[in-house]
Image (tube, rainbow, N blue to C red):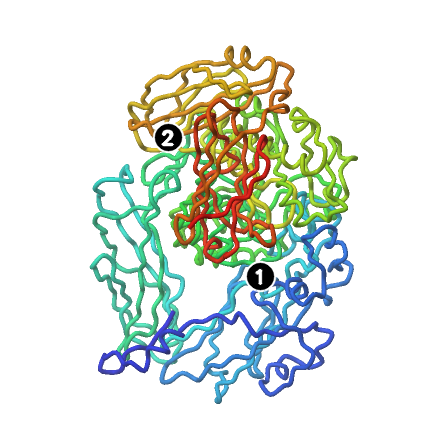
Amino acid sequence: MVRKLLNATGLLLAPFLPLAAQSQYELNSGWQCNNIAKVTVKGEALSAPSYKLSGWLPATVPGTVLTTLLNNKLVPDPFYGMNNQQIPDIYTTGRDHYTYWFVKDFTEQHPAADGQVWLHFRGVNDGCDIYLNGHRLNANTHFGTYLRHSYNITQWLSKDGKNRLAVVVYPPAVVGNPNGGQGGDGTIAKNVGPQYTAGWDWIQPMRDRNTGIWDKVTIEKTGAVRIKDPQIITKVPGVRLPEGKQAPANILVAATLENATAKSVEGTLRYTLAGNTISRKVTLAPNATTTVQLPDMELKQPALWWPSGYGPQHMYKLQLEFVDNAGVDDTEDVNFGVREIQTYWNAHTNSREVAVNGQKVFIKGGNWITSDAMFRFSRERYDAEIRFHRDMNLNLIRIWGGSLTERPEFYEACDKYGLLVFQDFWMSGDCNGRWVDPMKKEDQWTRRRYPDDHNLFIESVADQIKMLRNHASLAFWCGGNEITPPVDILAAIKDSLLPSLDNTRFFFHYSNTDSMSYNTLGGNGDGPYNIQPLSVFWNERTFPFNSEVGSVGVGDYESLERFIPAANMKAPQNVKDGVDSVWDYHKYIPYFDFVDPYGKPKDVKDFANKAQLVNYDQYRGLMEGFSAHMWDWYTGVIIWKTQNPWTALRGQMYDYYLDPNACLYGNRTGAAPLHVMCNPVDGNIYTVNNTFGYYTDVMLELNAYDMKGQKKQLTQVFTEISPKSLQKYLSVKGAIERMGAKEGMFLSARLRGKDQQILDDNLYWFPDSTGNYSGLQKMEAAKVQIVAQKAGADSIRVKISNPANGPVAFFNRVSLVDSKTKKRILPVFYNDNYVSVLPGEEKVVTISGEAIGKSSNAVVTVSGWNLSEQTINIAK
């Protein structure tokens, strides 16, 4: 941001205040576009404000060509049914079909004195030429999906303030054959851009390969000097705790200054933090760019930033200013957290161990592709998705290498919610040659040299490091997914770019490199990716820091209805041949015989409901199994994957429409920071403490319930639980087998604090001696009472009471629904869901989110395994 607020005497002038408020703004509306074949003039003529546009389409910027076509109803929604097959693919049509001109008229006056006006592009895929008011701004075509670019447009602004920007955007040079392989035929990786756009095993191809001005376009106004690429490094020595008095931390600040004038400029770069002003005088040569390191600052009593589950996410705001004789030339606001991330080699597990502020942290992560496969990004959607990850009790997100360097708004949400980020660069073993692959056009040696332009890749890495390095959440850089970059790119990143631009973060050569997780088992070093018996998670040792391991993830019936046509709503069979074509197109992973023990599904709704039981059990079991061996077998685990940027039927804790399924809440339970859990194979009970707190006088309660709700106490014992520890207690295998032999049974495992409040609550359901849930299939209906009441402008409190002398009210889904449309209100957030209520007890589910305050027709619905759907009005 920028402003020239002071006159020569140094007094603040009121007339400048409106200008200051508009010192940076986004060009995000009023764009028009047209296909290159329909534009008969060159860019110089097209960008003249007097040139008349006729028959042009309203364009979505930021956005892709496909997004604009969809918004103009020229293509069907590619996320619904088989619609994507109806959209022409660029491999067949040729690149010109998706080559478009984008035009934007805007008002901006010539600045006074030494004022400067800048045009910034934060992301264009892939090439573009840019014209303003009859002048070409870039001498050579700009290439690089991930490379920001800026232009000083001061001299080209029109005298009357009416300006026209015209941009022609070219698709990637090599669009790739979407032949069904991972990244299609692999040649999409010849570009420096996203690889998934040619299709993967969890997504169909994006037909335009995401061509477009896909990220923000902004205008910035400065004085003679512009502040660029600030860097804030925080040093937090010693071993810290979230609470109590803090020793000082050290703050190191630098920034690049660009003098846009033909004369020398003297001034001061400065900032104020916690009552201290830090500054350095600078002399800038004409048209010079200089990086300035400010004196170090000691921050007393710092409020530290911690990962989710370990402490609060305190943030600071720092405003850099450059001041010369004429006043404030430019300011740059930077939000940052005070924290230091360390890594060590754990010789016992043979894997990387992570510490934050001196405290080791067991990594519970999720793999992320991108928020939206068509690059329809928003701050609100990012916030909701990262909040879901926080609610899953995760503490890390890995950005997979076949996609993006995520946007600053993504990182802001991770800063806010405490999610560490493991950021891959843009490589994948599939496209870049790790394996023999008959689907690929070229051999491994050729693919190993992708992309074609190594210098562009290196330049893009440098730029993205500068863009993201101040975020507290950014923890690690990684060369790529399952493969290192080519040797010259790898050397440039590790030996040049990171040492000079960001020497505070560990760099992994690739996502399952030996420096992360030493592979003694053979195979690829990550996976598997399909449904597994719970015994595998608990008892079979896998890679010591598994970067990708996951399971199924079909949503419930309401989720399926959003993108599967009614004619295709068929319960899938156990073999692929029995899967409907739409389900297959949307990448369904078979549940095999994991659903049938609950009773063979009668229809697709019954299947989806029973699939939620499997989902919950799978991800609770995954997280519990890894936690049961933390610091012994494992130092971390990252789920493949936690979200879908498309309407896929796998690897998701919530669907594309931001509706959570039982995967999220099973994961939330299994990954709880303080947790009691049961090994389903040997019946052993454990507690795991993933916090820095020491718990004394904790009551461990184990109770068994039969299908009628009759209770049998197994044990009740006081214990103490040390920080960052796992503790084994006793086996209840015999009790489970005896009580559950005929119909199955429930096991309630709880931890209570000193005031008898529940610290952790975990309910298991076990099958009968044949492996079937015969008792569940004939449970009596629960006779619950449900009350919903407003608890604030954006929150609702739902209390479910289950009377004594009846069965468990099992696996209840709470939903916020529009009473008129009967559709769920999205997104909203539940502190828990798919909840079970024991006889004689009650549970409270809190619903929160801005969507609550915006809806005047909201009601609550609750339905469960043995509870028909009930609709509850919300009391004020």
Which residue lies under the disc numbered 1?
144
Which amino acid type corresponds to the residue marked 2 in the rendered image?
Leu
Q: Position of residue 495 (x, y in %)?
A: 45, 48
State the SS at label 1. Answer: loop
Q: Earlier in the sequence, mark 1 or mark 2?
A: 1
| Cα–Cα gap, marks 1 and 2 | 50 Å
Crowding at mark 1 (Cα within 10 Å: few <14, some 14-19, many 20+): many
Looking at the image, residue 686 lies above or below residue 405:
above
* Residue situated in front as seen by the camera: 339 or 663: 663
Q: Confirm whether residue 505 shows in the render.
A: yes
Which residue lies under the disc numbered 2?
759
Looking at the image, residue 184 lies above or below residue 628:
below
Q: Position of residue 687 (x, y in %)?
A: 40, 24
Which amino acid type corresponds to the residue marked 1 in the rendered image?
Gly
Image quadrant containing the N terminus = bottom left
The nearer-to-camera label among 1 and 2 is 2
- Residues at discs 1 and 2 in contact (Cβ within 8 Å): no
- Residue located at (49% from left, 81% from top): 107
